[in-house]
Image (cartoon, rainbow, N blue to C red):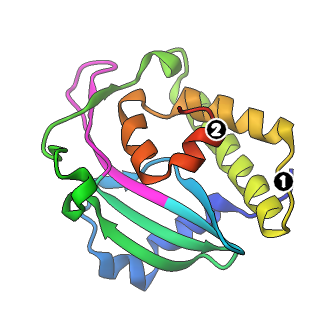
Amino acid sequence: MNGIDVNKLIKDLRHSELYRQCRLPLEYSEGLPMLEKVGQRVLLQIPYLCYRITGQKDRTLVYPLRYLITLELPSGKMVRFADLSLEVRFAKVDFARPVGLFRHEAVRHLNRAQYRQQRSELLKLYGVIAQALLEGNEPGAQHVQQMSDLLKMLLEPSLWPMYVVINEDFCQRFGLL
C-alpha cells in the first residue's frame, strides 16, 4: 500500500508553528480525519475533540468535535482552522457536555496495541485513497471497502452526526450515512 503518509502529516502538524498559533487547549486530541476533494485540490480535515477519563473501564467521556484543521495534500500546508463552536451549523451543540463513551461496542474487544494498530492501518488507507484522488483516479474498491470497515469500527458512533455535518460526501462514500 503506497500513498501519502497521513500519520506523519499529523505528527508534523503537532510540531508546527501554525499549530501552536491555533492555541488548541492541551486536552484536545485529533479524531479521525476526513478527505475532501475540491476541484483539483485534495484536503485532509482533522477534527479535534476532548476525552475525559472517569476511572471506570470503558467509561471515558467523549465530547463533541470542537476544532477543525484542514491541510492541503500532499504538502500538508494548513489552509483552514475553525472553532466549530462559533459556527451557526453547530449552534445547538453543547460543547461542555459529553456525547458518548469510549470504548464503544465495536472496539471493546481490542486492547490498546490492537486499537493503535487498527488506527494506523486506517491512516495508511487515507494516504492510499488521497494519493489516488491526487492522481485523478478513482480509489480502488477494495481500499474504499477496507477504509469504510475500519472507519465504522473505530469512529465513536456518537460523533457520526458531526462528521456528517462537516463532510457529508466523505460520510456517504465511507458508509457513515
User: Of residues 12 and 30, which is closer to you in this image?
Assistant: 30
The residue shown at (32%, 60%) is 67
Q: How many marks?
A: 2
For residue 47, which numbered disc appears in the image? none
> In the rendered structure, which segment of residues is drawn in magenta?
46-65
Q: Is residue 64 above or below residue 136?
A: above
Q: Is residue 63 magenta?
A: yes
Mark earlier in primary sequence (1, 2): 1
Amino acid on which disc 2 is placed: Phe
Q: Residues within 10 Å of mark 1 (few under 14, many from 20)?
A: few
- Tell me whether the residue at label 1 lies in contact with that at label 2, contact meaning CB atoms closer than 8 angstroms: no
Q: Is residue 121 above or below residue 60?
A: below
Q: For numbered disc 1, what is the local secondary structure?
A: loop
Q: Which residue is mark 2?
A: 174
Please identify the quarter of the rendering in which residue 14 is found.
bottom left
Q: Which residue is painted at 65% across and 60% down in the image?
A: 6
Could you say where residue 152 lies in the image, as x and y percent from the top left?
A: 57, 29
Circle 2 Cα neighbour tier, 10 Å, few/some/many (<14 / 14–19 / ≥20): some
Q: Rounded to the nearest whole Å, what is the CA distance between mark 1 and mark 2?
A: 14 Å
Q: In the structure shown, which secondary structural element does the residue marked by tag 2 occupy?
A: loop
| Label placed on residue 138 | 1
- Of residues 25 and 82, the one nearer the viewer is 82
Q: Nearer the viewer, residue 46 or 54?
A: 46
Left-right relation of 132 to 100? right
Q: Is residue 116 magenta?
A: no
Q: Quadrant of residue 161?
A: top left
The answer to whether residue 90 is above or below residue 14 is: above
Q: Residue at x 25, y 32 (%)?
A: 99
Residue 94 x %, y %: 14, 43
Horizontal side of 1 relative to 31 (left or right) equals right
Q: Residue at x 64, y 38 (%)?
A: 174
